[in-house]
Amino acid sequence: MLVGIMADTHDYLPMVEKAVKKFNEEGVELVLHAGDYVAPFVIPRFKGLNAKLVGVFGNNDGDRELLKKRFSEYDGMELRGNFAELHVNNKKIALLHGSEEELLKALIESQNFDVVVHGHTHKAEVYRKGKMLVVNPGEVCGYITGKSTIALLDTEKLEAKIIELPK
């Protein structure tokens, strides 16, 4: 299965729309969002996804109750809280924002997951730690690095790649 991964959208609506378009072009079946939507008005921009969306909170997500409400207004969209464990194609995936560095490190060191997905640092990277794949899709907003990025995860090959979105 092809899984789209994004994080740190930070209210930047034009880039959210470009990410949604790219995920649809790639034919992803699931999108994981590692948090920092920031404001609830971003959530309706995900309704154009042709895939299920599962997200978690980030440290800059303000009105969490309204974010949950906005998610619940759309079929195929689920906001899990601070952490989500997903099982996709017999792969165990941990999804969190990553702002609690000690927790993120413990999850990676545990080797209890096939994939750990996080954001927070705005630094796009894919690497292996033991048997585990660690994916940070970078920032959709492009505010810190100047690059708007997402990631694609192939769960069968257990490989991921970073994709830069055009400005």
Image: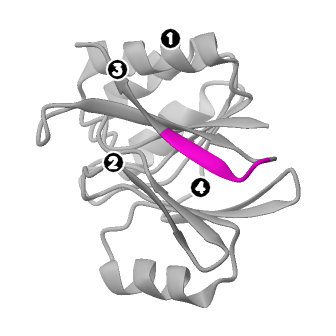
The residue that label 4 is drawn on is: 80
Against 21, residue 130 (above or below) is: below
Query: Regarding mark 1 in the picture, which secondary structure is present there?
Result: helix
Query: Regarding mark 3 in the picture, which secondary structure is present there?
Result: strand
Q: Within 10 Å of the Cα at label 2, are there few (<14), some (14-19), or many (20+) other Cα atoms?
A: many
Tell me the CA gap for discs 2 and 4.
23 Å
Q: Within 10 Å of the Cα at label 3, are there few (<14), some (14-19), or many (20+) other Cα atoms?
A: some
Q: Earlier in the sequence, mark 3 or mark 2?
A: 2
Query: Regarding mark 4 in the picture, which secondary structure is present there?
Result: loop
Tell me the CA gap for discs 1 and 4.
24 Å
Q: Position of residue 98 (x, y in %)?
A: 37, 67
Q: Earlier in the sequence, mark 3 or mark 4?
A: 4
Magenta part of the chain: 157-161
Q: Disc 3 marks which amino acid?
A: Leu
The residue that label 2 is drawn on is: 124
Question: Nearer the observer, disc 2 or disc 4?
Answer: 2
Observer-nearest of 113 and 34: 113
Quadrant of the image occupied by residue 42: top left
Q: Disc 1 marks which amino acid?
A: Lys
Question: Nearer the observer, disc 1 or disc 2?
Answer: 2
Q: Are marks 1 and 2 in contact (CB under 8 Å)?
A: no
Q: Position of residue 167 (x, y in %)?
A: 22, 13
Query: Regarding mark 2 in the picture, which secondary structure is present there?
Result: loop
The residue that label 3 is drawn on is: 165
Q: Which mark is residue 118?
A: none
Q: Are marks 3 and 4 in contact (CB under 8 Å)?
A: no
Against 6, residue 49 (above or below) is: above
Q: Which mark is residue 21?
A: 1
Q: Within 10 Å of the Cα at label 1, are there few (<14), some (14-19), or many (20+) other Cα atoms?
A: some
Report the residue at 63% width, 71% height from top: 132
Q: Earlier in the sequence, mark 1 or mark 2?
A: 1
